[in-house]
Image (spheres, coloured by chain):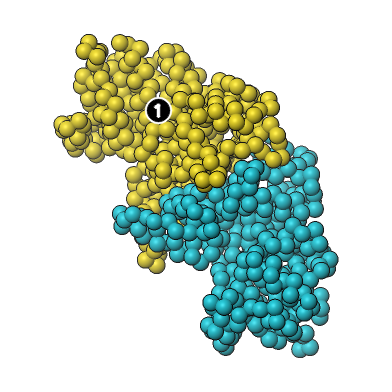
Chain colours: A cyan, B yellow
Amino acid sequence: MSNQKLFNVAVVGATGAVGEQILRLLAQRNFPIQELKLLSSARSAGKKLQFKGREVTIEEATPDSFKGVDIALFSAGGDVSRALVPEAIKHGTVCIDNTSAFRMDPETPLVVPEVNIDKVSDHKGVIANPNCSTIQLVQTLKPLYDRFGISRIIVSTYQAVSGAGVSAINEMLRQSREVLEGNAVEPQILPVGSLPVKHQIAFNAIPQIDKFVDNGFTYEEMKMINETKKIMGDDTLEVTTTCVRIPVVYGHSESVYVELKQDFDIEEVKRLLADAPGIVVQDNTAEQLYPLATEAAGKLETFVGRIRRDLSNPRALNLWIVSDNLLKGAAWNAVQIAEYIAIEQQ
Amino acid sequence: MSNQKLFNVAVVGATGAVGEQILRLLAQRNFPIQELKLLSSARSAGKKLQFKGREVTIEEATPDSFKGVDIALFSAGGDVSRALVPEAIKHGTVCIDNTSAFRMDPETPLVVPEVNIDKVSDHKGVIANPNCSTIQLVQTLKPLYDRFGISRIIVSTYQAVSGAGVSAINEMLRQSREVLEGNAVEPQILPVGSLPVKHQIAFNAIPQIDKFVDNGFTYEEMKMINETKKIMGDDTLEVTTTCVRIPVVYGHSESVYVELKQDFDIEEVKRLLADAPGIVVQDNTAEQLYPLATEAAGKLETFVGRIRRDLSNPRALNLWIVSDNLLKGAAWNAVQIAEYIAIEQQ
């Protein structure tokens, strides 16, 4: 496009696991950028990052950083978003926020482009990017919801350590080496950096992601429950979640039981999923084909397999859903929203 | 006991992952053994194993091996059990079979001592030890079934590689080293040794344990469904399972959703579980206490935590159940049955 409108774009949290992927995708997708601002905490300010072959110096994110910025992508934690998104909005910046800060705010659209891109235009300056585990779930269930209706969803997750950031990846790899060498493991970060008790993640499964709520669920589990209802626009959905961290670097897997409101044909279910945008069906038991985290890592799509009718409830389906938690689960979903905004403004 | 009756005991598959634990437990529990026979394939015959400080030479298992044997514990695979259990029975040997060969045979009791030890006396020469994932599930659900009734169980598993034998443990550890060193991984055993397609298990989650059945479920999943109904003695139970292998060495974890037939008090549920034999409740969200595979490894108990009322269905509970798959999931359950038989015959 020769007369393409160009945008001043800021990436807040540019050095984090998600920020790094946002930059990679903005470059790879040739996002129409006039000026790129990389923002972070004071600690990383002054560092330089490569973008399309040139160096960009990271600046400290302050309320004034957003002057002249058209679109800002935030992934520097909820506290940073709560402090700076309102400041950016004052400057007329459209914010795409990857944290949980505004997700459940009734004024803020919570968007998965394949599910509810129409909500973007309702924004009051900020559009929220859902939790990683939620995105791949609702993206996959949307075509089934539209065709058959859904009454209940029961999910158990198998979540990668990259969801807890670069330091959690390093901790998992370091612990793995220590166990293989027969040395003692001293957990320092997982399950939750800010809580006192730490558990070994190498060769283990930790049934805690984020802090606990009084009802015995974790915040991660509550996010999946609440965000799924909000994105699907259906408060009557019954959703149950158990969120578990396992020793995988990239790629969240989900074991999903879903009760439909109508009888269904399993071949039609597979066709609906195969035709859905951004979804790849990997489902062939004869060839032992099903989604795997190691295969989904680095890809933009969400993968679904083990598609089978439940034996105890003929209106229920079982699915295995896998996606790269840093890509469709975070950076790619945010960049998709940014691309939609850019196209709308052409 | 000075006049304790002593038994001639055979262990078939003595060199396997489960056989090794059976021997360790027979020694540790001071099982009343007159003569111990270690049996295996021709390949391992002639090797020597230590038992209570003395050497025992492994013999090849043949139909004649069981002459004079009172109790035989089988864990050498379904084919060996199908071939030799009937031969052992001819010699009057009581067989405790850890394979799936006889589990669903209507004549064969399928026993988890804490659930249905009374079935042992119905045996016609063989008592089946259930699948590892089933044992920890039914053991935990039994007190809730007795008190409230259960209508539906939905389980997703997080299963250790030791369930696929010593070679799978070695493969997982080798692959982990290869990934950490940045080398290519060449999967050779998992998910199923006898099937052509292999997948990386290190830093991955594989949603296939055992071969696939025509209905899209795996044999492992069908075992859990069918065995749970048989052990609980209730064909009306609705059970759904998704069985997943993760990179853990010892200890299966299970995310369990269970619908009760009556309203319940969550504190009573915790008390019932805490009072149940062989169960340890680890449930304190303030202290981030819940069962972990690495902590359950090497222990005889089954651990349960994350006990919480479902938010979408007030008659449903969510639980996280962990046990050492080679111990309560296999060797210890078998030795418990052997101990019961020994005590009955005193």
Residue at mark 1? B333
At 29% from the left and 36% from the top, the residue drawn is B20
Where, by quadrant of the figure, is residue A163 drawn?
bottom right
Under tag 1, what secondary structure? helix
Where, by quadrant of the figure, is residue B93 drawn?
top left
Residue A200 percent location from the top left of the image = 43, 52
The relative height of residue A97 versus residue B290 in the rendered view (above or below) is below
Q: Is residue B170 left or right of residue A188?
A: left
Residue B21 percent location from the top left of the image = 32, 35
Q: Is residue A152 left or right of residue B68?
A: right
Residue A9 visible in the current orientation? no
At 69% from the left and 27% from the top, the residue drawn is B263
Q: Chain of mark 1?
A: B
On the rendered image, what quadrant is the N terminus of chain B found in?
A: top left
List the single residue furthest toward the right.
Answer: A122
At 43% from the left and 48% from the top, the residue drawn is B248
Q: Specify few, some or many for label 1: CA neighbours under 10 Å numbering under 14, 14-19, or 20 or more.
A: many
Residue A4 percent location from the top left of the image = 77, 85
In depth, the one of B320 and B201 nearer the eye is B320
Question: Which residue type carries mark 1?
Answer: Asn
Q: Is residue A175 left or right of residue A255?
A: left
In depth, the one of B308 and B229 nearer the eye is B308
Residue B242 visible in the current orientation? yes
